[in-house]
Image (cartoon, rainbow, N blue to C red):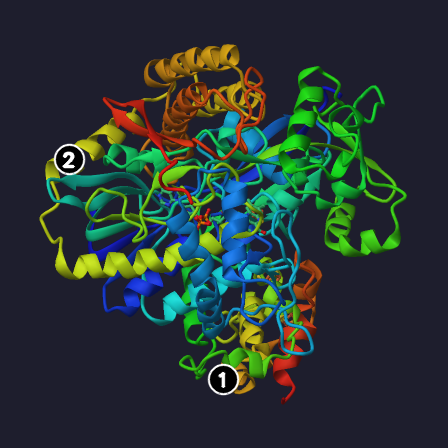
Amino acid sequence: MITEVTDILVIGTGSAGYCSAIEAARRGRSVLLADKGLAGKSGCTVTAEQIAAVIPGMIRGDSAEIHYRDTLEAGKGLSDPALVRIMTEEAHRCIEKLERLGALFTRNRDGKYALDPMNGHSYPRSLYYKDITGKMIIDTLKAEAERIGVGVMEDVQIISLITGDNGVSGAVGLNFRYAQPVLIRARAVVLASGGAGELFPLSTNPVQSTGDGLILALKAGAVVRDIEFYQFYPVCLVYPKTLSGFVLGISQFGRLYNSRGERFMEKHDPVRMESATRDILSQAIFREIREGQVGPHGGVYLDATGLNEEIYEEYSDAISITRKHGIDLKIDRVEVRPAGHYAIGGIKINEKTETGVPGLFSAGEVTGGIHGANRLGNNSMLDTVVFGMRAGRFAAEYAAENGGEKADMEQAIGEIKRVKTLSERGVRKYAPWQIKKRLQKIMDEKVGIIKSKDQLVSAGRELKTLEDQLREETGVSARGFFFNRSLRDYLETANLLILARAIVLASLEREESRGAHFREDYPDVVGDEEAVSLEITLEGGDPVLQKRALSGETQ
Amino acid sequence: MSSEAFSVKIFKFDPSIDATPYYKEFLIETGTGQSVLDLLKEIYRNHDSDISFRFSCRLGKCGVCAVRVNGKPVLACQTTVENGDVVIEPLKGFPVIKDLIVERETYRDRLKSARPYPDRADRSGGSSVQKLWADPNASPFLCTDCLACMSSCKALSRIPWEFPGPAFFTNLARWHYHPLDRSDRPALAIRSGISHCTACKSCSKVCPKGIDVYKEAIEALEKKP
Ligand SMILES: Cc1cc2nc3c(=O)[nH]c(=O)nc-3n(C[C@H](O)[C@H](O)[C@H](O)COP(=O)(O)OP(=O)(O)OC[C@H]3O[C@@H](n4cnc5c(N)ncnc54)[C@H](O)[C@@H]3O)c2cc1C
Ligand code: SF4
Ligand code: SF4
Ligand code: FES
């Protein structure tokens, strides 16, 4: 066993994780970052294209206040106004900080930022650097972290947090590279482990997005909120496989057809057609898929031929990338469908990114409450930066005053024994990936874009069966810890199953349609009033639910 | 879909068990438009669950999945194999940790000597960047550190201790073009052995991001500013 001691452990090396690590290290704390993949390369951040922020003096009329209102509007009564206030007001300062570290954002000749518009934002306020903004940000943060001496552990999957009467005192991980368990003793822990796109068969997320952080937090006693809201990106390629999950923004100018050749958006939104909102598009495409009106790869057809050259120019990146893979959007129809994109709900935090468990802080996509019932495009990267920096600051303050208790060795040893036993399971009836694949199918068909009581109840039953099968009949064919992918798949699938059951539970309880949550049996979209937040905790390994009325909170 | 099969040979090496590396052959049903990554996943699922390889984004953006396919360094997730026999091996020029996973630390440690951040920059000021902004518009910023170019570089494989390889210089070029960087990157390039480059340009040919590494990194750094 490897033992590490640090003031602050940060789990996840996306933008949220790096921002916290840097801020904490700057305050003189020792910081260790852990990631189950390669640092700065294993999360969603590296693929993000833009970041929203209102910079004073850029666009006449725009302000942090309007950004705040836009965000609350999209959140449909479920956003925590205090968090949104912080995000929109600190945006400017955080962007400036990133720039000082060396992040580049494209500017016009006059020195002002080049800003793109985005659905739901009242003004153009999305900054970018080519289409590699996320990569630009993460490369910059990584360089800075290295410069100031933040420690990084790669190929280390955190499998449990160590808790006691005084809160969190560290974590246990598996180092797949050195084939060893790791015990990390820390005064404070920041969870920044990203989303859970792997819940769905088609996702825009990297393979590491398995919701581990949500389960780590739940097991440590934290609360997860509004997890029934999962955002889908409506038009993503399903074929060629090399590009499955590739987002096609050009679709709003194209035409969608089912396999009968019907332009089905005529039925669903005859006015806006293919430029309807993401939810409506996703639902319409999903209905066609459910009725089997699909092509050979299970998607509907996008026809983006015959558009005017300016549009092709604007989407030249997508066109050149797809061309490399043998399709020409100017000539060919392509098969598309919605893909799981963003976990809107997540760990409940307050303004200081505290989770309620002493010493446990959290930031980024793994948290909930900021984007409410639906997330505005490009607000997510902003969220990771603003709250990532805050998490680093408050974790550092906490670590200066608290912690240092001996980690509960018994807990740690128990965990290590548990995974060791798992790693010796050998072959059984099922392999973990088979369980994961079945889980994804259930989530896609019954718990995704369109939900109903019957479907959710049946999904809940099936998930329970899967959980039993995982526990009893699923093997871990490779032995030991050395890059043991089947062990890793096992652990991740176990997390996804708990998360999936929590989503079913909350989706059943939410008998309404709001934001990204659509119930076919309660199709009328409700207003922002009387918004109720659904909070999940874990009891004896099972998710349980509490309701919290928010009407007093919103303004 | 036909049920013909083709052969996929994979480099396997687990230093904790194997005395020497070997190739394991798998017969894979001919599909349509499978990526090398799909093949590897298929092998993991249905043939050999103990095979090790890296991937993450599946979209050509993170750069962690680079391997050699029939000798050529490529991104596994972005390379299609229709059928026809293939050999999949780890990148050349790096020690193998397990199967297709190579050790990146040596490269990274070496990179540290290049001070890979805006060096001698003024980090205190307000929006210092604004005054300095001139769109660097340089392709080295696109580099994903996939290391494909390193695998193709003969100078690197011949004299690894004197020549740090193309990705090193792409990285250096990034800071060379950076508006905040104040250090003399060309001088550092000379100290790092840039003169050993043979100008063969294979790095430019294999870069999955289409970076003309030779022109935008090597030549740019050799030219005095
Ligand atoms: C294709 C795509 C495009 C996007 N475009 C945009 C955009 O243009 N604008 C925008 O605002 N947002 C965009 N988003 C969303 C945005 O990128 C993400 O929400 C954001 O990057 C999340 O950052 P993060 O730091 O919270 O997590 P991530 O960047 O996802 O990082 C999480 C890290 O945690 C690690 N991890 C997870 N579990 C464990 C564990 N158990 N142990 C150790 N490590 C672990 C992972 O390996 C990963 O490296 C996009 C997302 C995708 C997928
Ligand atoms: S051009 Fe120079 S750096 Fe590039 S592959 Fe040839 S020798 Fe290596
Ligand atoms: S220069 Fe190109 S080939 Fe070399 S590491 Fe960067 S992206 Fe990869
Ligand atoms: S998996 Fe990210 S580039 Fe291939």
Task: Identify which amino acid the numbered label 1 is placed on.
Answer: Arg
Residue position for label 2:
A411
Res. B191 mark = 1
Tell me the quarter of the image containing the N terminus of chain A: top left
Left or right for A356, reference A135: left
Disc 2 residue: CB within 8 Å of ligand 1: no
Q: Report x, y in % for residue B114.
A: 46, 76
Identify whether A554 is placed above or below A317.
above
Q: Quadrant of residue A237?
A: top right
Can I make out residue A14 in this image?
A: no
Label 1 CB less than 8 angstroms from ligand 2: no
**Where B86 falls versus A21 (above or below)?**
above
Is A38 in front, or is B66? A38
Q: Is residue B132 left or right of residue A90?
A: right
Q: Position of residue A203 (x, y in %)?
A: 57, 35
Label 1 resides on the chain identified as B
- Element type at mark 1: helix
Residue located at (9% from left, 50% from top): A405
The answer to whether residue A381 is visible is yes
The reply to whether callout 1 and callout 2 are in contact (CB within 8 Å) is no
Residue occupying image coordinates x 50% and y 58%: A65
Q: As drawn, is A310 to the left or to the right of A372? A: right
Q: Residues within 10 Å of mark 1 (few under 14, many from 20)?
A: few
Q: Measured from the top left, where is residue A463 in percent x and y?
A: 42, 16
Q: Chain of mark 2?
A: A
**Quarter of the figure with the C terminus of chain A:** top left
| Residue at the image point whose x is 69% and y is 65% from the top | B204
Please tell me the numbered disc located at residue A275: none
Quadrant of picture, ligand 2: bottom right
